[in-house]
């Protein structure tokens, strides 16, 4: 069930709570200390997903007016839905087996997704127009039987000229590559760790990308896996040249995605120990490009953070219980709100 929310606020943030039958999509106005509004409430899944199955994922255009929602319906069927929160309009966009989380372009016109299949003609990374009836176009091919195949989409550049992707080398760990979606199909060769054909290249190890500084200073986060790799945060130029390491922890930690501040002189990230259970605290840091840093939060009940549009606030989902949550400004400069995870009104949540 969708709800028309009217004009999207200038400073907005979408987030989800719950999973399966309890999945809800909410919209938070960063300029108002008011509970977020409900955009979508889920219905019952035809088949209950297993504990390791991601049953929902979503991606948002730069203006917040178009969302692509993925819903796992069964082992043989996942579907993408195009949602326009201003009007509450929702329509089925594409469906099939083996679909991964969608990544929408900033202008809301294209969506990239990985599709896993034993069929060589189906396996790969695809791009689909949000409007129109044309089917998807394959952007990256890969060997279907290879562990880690196919590459998955990470993030579009702000101008939509590049798509960052994550080719997984299995024991070699996750890499970050960039692909020009207008240059035709390319093939990822895991043996040589290069793209063949089209216009694409591997930038280095990593699993998360922030394009805010543009293609000459792409911010990449890499975390070592059980099979090896490196744990560090660095910038790199799409055109080539040496990478610039911004942070390399000395301890054995897992780094959360690094996010540029609007001024580009600092970024936010999280750290947690490699070994730890559900109660292990997550530390949120603001790290500056000059190497100085400030820990702004540490708790087992804090989510990955996001900057407000003007950079004066650093929000995260914090604390609460199984029915009530809170959006907190970790910098203590105002803002934030409580909200109900399952419905109701703050003070008497369901």
Image: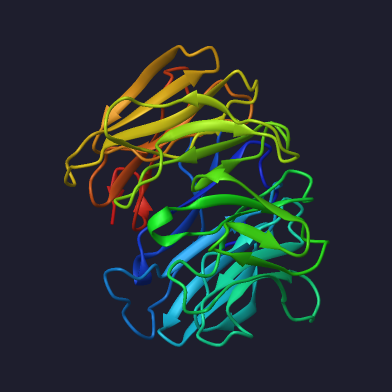
x then y, percent, for residue 147: 43, 70
Q: Quadrant of the C terminus?
A: bottom left
**Residue nearest the observer in this picture, 303 or 126:** 126
Q: Is residue 108 left or right of residue 303?
A: right
Instruction: Check the image and report above or below for 322 versus 144.
Output: above
Q: Nearer the viewer, residue 327 or 78?
A: 78
How many marks do you count on the picture?
Answer: 0
* Residue 110 coordinates in the image, percent (x, y): 73, 63
48 above or below 147?
below
Colour scheme used in the picture? rainbow
Residue shown at 81%/76% (left/top)? 132
Residue 252, quarter of picture: top left
Q: Nearer the viewer, residue 337 or 304?
A: 304
Residue at the (40%, 84%) spot, across then down: 75
Is residue 333 among what the camera can see?
A: yes
Residue 140 picture location, percent across and down: 66, 68
Q: Residue pushed farthest front?
A: 192
Q: Residue at x 51, y 77 (%)?
A: 116
Question: From what the image shows, is residue 181 above or below residue 221?
Answer: below
User: Which is more toward the observer, 44 or 347?
Assistant: 44
Q: Is residue 1 visible?
A: no
Image location of residue 318, percent across then percent down: 33, 37
Residue 348 appears left or right of 222: left
- Would residue 333 appear left or right of 158 to someone viewing this image? left
Is 173 on the left-hand or right-hand side of 4? left
């Amino acid at each position: 069930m969708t709800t028309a929310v009217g004009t999207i606020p200038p400073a907005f943030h979408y987030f989800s709570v719950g999973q399966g039958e309890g999945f809800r999509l909410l919209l938070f106005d960063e300029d108002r200390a008011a509970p977020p509004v409900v955009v979508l409430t889920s219905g019952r899944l035809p088949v209950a997903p297993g504990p390791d199955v991601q049953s929902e994922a979503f991606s948002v255009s730069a203006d917040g007016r178009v969302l692509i929602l993925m819903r796992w319906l069964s082992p043989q069927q996942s579907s993408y839905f195009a949602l326009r929160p201003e009007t509450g309009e929702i329509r089925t966009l594409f469906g099939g087996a083996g679909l991964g989380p969608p990544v929408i372009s900033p202008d809301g016109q294209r969506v990239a997704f990985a599709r896993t299949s034993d069929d060589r003609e189906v396996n790969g990374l695809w791009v689909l127009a949000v409007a129109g009836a044309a089917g998807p176009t394959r952007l990256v091919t890969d060997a279907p039987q290879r562990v880690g195949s196919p590459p998955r989409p990470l993030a579009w550049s702000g101008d939509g000229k590049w798509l960052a992707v994550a080719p997984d080398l299995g024991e070699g760990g996750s890499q970050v590559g960039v692909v020009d979606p207008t240059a035709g199909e390319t093939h990822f060769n895991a043996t040589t760790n290069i793209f063949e054909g089209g216009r694409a290249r591997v930038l280095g190890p990593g699993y998360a990308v922030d394009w805010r500084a543009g293609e000459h200073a792409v911010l990449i986060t890499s975390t070592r896996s059980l099979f090896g790799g490196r744990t560090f945060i660095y910038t790199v130029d799409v055109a080539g040249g040496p990478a610039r390491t911004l942070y390399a922890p000395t301890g054995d930690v897992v780094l959360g995605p690094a996010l540029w501040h609007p001024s580009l002189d600092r970024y936010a990230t999280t750290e947690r120990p490699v070994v730890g259970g559900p109660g292990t605290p997550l530390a949120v840091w603001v790290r500056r490009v000059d190497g100085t840093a400030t820990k702004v939060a540490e708790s087992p009940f804090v989510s990955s953070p996001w900057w407000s549009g003007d950079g004066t606030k650093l929000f995260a989902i914090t604390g609460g219980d199984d029915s009530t949550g809170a959006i907190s400004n970790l910098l203590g400069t105002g803002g934030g709100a409580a909200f109900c995870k399952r419905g109701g009104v703050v003070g008497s949540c369901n």
